[in-house]
Amino acid sequence: IAGITQAPTSQILAAGRRMTLRCTQDMRHNAMYWYRQDLGLGLRLIHYSNTAGTTGKGEVPDGYSVSRANTDDFPLTLASAVPSQTSVYFCASSDRENTEAFFGQGTRLTVV
Amino acid sequence: GQNIDQPTEMTATEGAIVQINCTYQTSGFNGLFWYQQHAGEAPTFLSYNVLDGLEEKGRFSSFLSRSKGYSYLLLKELQMKDSASYLCASMDSNYQLIWGAGTKLIIKP
């Protein structure tokens, strides 16, 4: 089934641990994004990539890193998790910058 | 600064019409998006407006006034399955989406 897949679906992580959230799309979209969604706040952009080989910082990039080695994959890494990174993380992709974005099902991360 | 405002919560009756308003202030403007998000699920695309006026898509319509920095989403013939959060997002000059916190719509029988 075409779409965008995230893994894991949920995770409980000890503070200080390193964690990579995976995101894969098979729609051949150029642009990919990582957002976090917290109660009472809008989606906030962490990092983005307009095309394979390039990445950029969003609104809340600190503590996170990304890579875009190919078109399909866009992993998000937390180098040393902290409790404030407890959130729901959504990966999204779009064909071009100003077209609709398709979202993965989300990863619910709890840092304790 | 960049800001999106929309009501936190609204309640409406099944079969009725509801209008969800959104005002935006962004650095530049490349369009206004509306997404629907059911609890525990991912956002899904509803509409995109870049020119002034009304775009109709079945039971859902979206309106934009660029001069007023204002948009609304109109839902007609409400169904119970329309109970969800509705997210307004403005695309700025860098083609980044600035999101509102969402409007939780509660539909009552």
Image: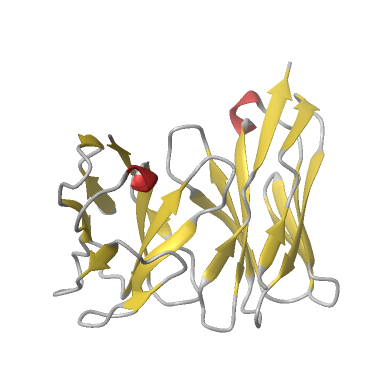
In the image, what residue occupies the spot 68% across and 34% down? B105
- Compared with A24, A59 (above or below) is below
User: Is A17 placed left or right of B75 in the picture?
Assistant: left
How far across and how far down the image is residue A41, in percent? Answer: 57, 48
In the image, what residue occupies the spot 48% across and 58% down? A44
In the image, what residue occupies the spot 85% across and 71% down? B68
Relative depth, front residue between B61 and B43? B43
The reply to whether residue B18 is in sight is yes
Point out the image quarter for the C terminus of chain A.
top left
Relative depth, front residue between B11 and A65? A65
User: Is B83 placed left or right of B17 in the picture?
Assistant: left
The structure's colour scheme is secondary structure
How far across and how far down the image is residue B60, in percent? Answer: 69, 48
Most extreme residue toward the right is B68
Please tell me in which quadrant of the rendered image residue A86 appears: top left
- Compared with A88, A33 (above or below) is below
- Compared with A31, B36 (above or below) is above
Most extreme residue toward the top is B109
In the image, what residue occupies the spot 44% across and 63% down? A45
Please tell me in which quadrant of the rendered image residue A77 appears: bottom left
How far across and how far down the image is residue B24, in percent? Answer: 73, 66
The reply to whether residue A1 is in sight is no
User: Is B92 placed left or right of A104 in the picture?
Assistant: right
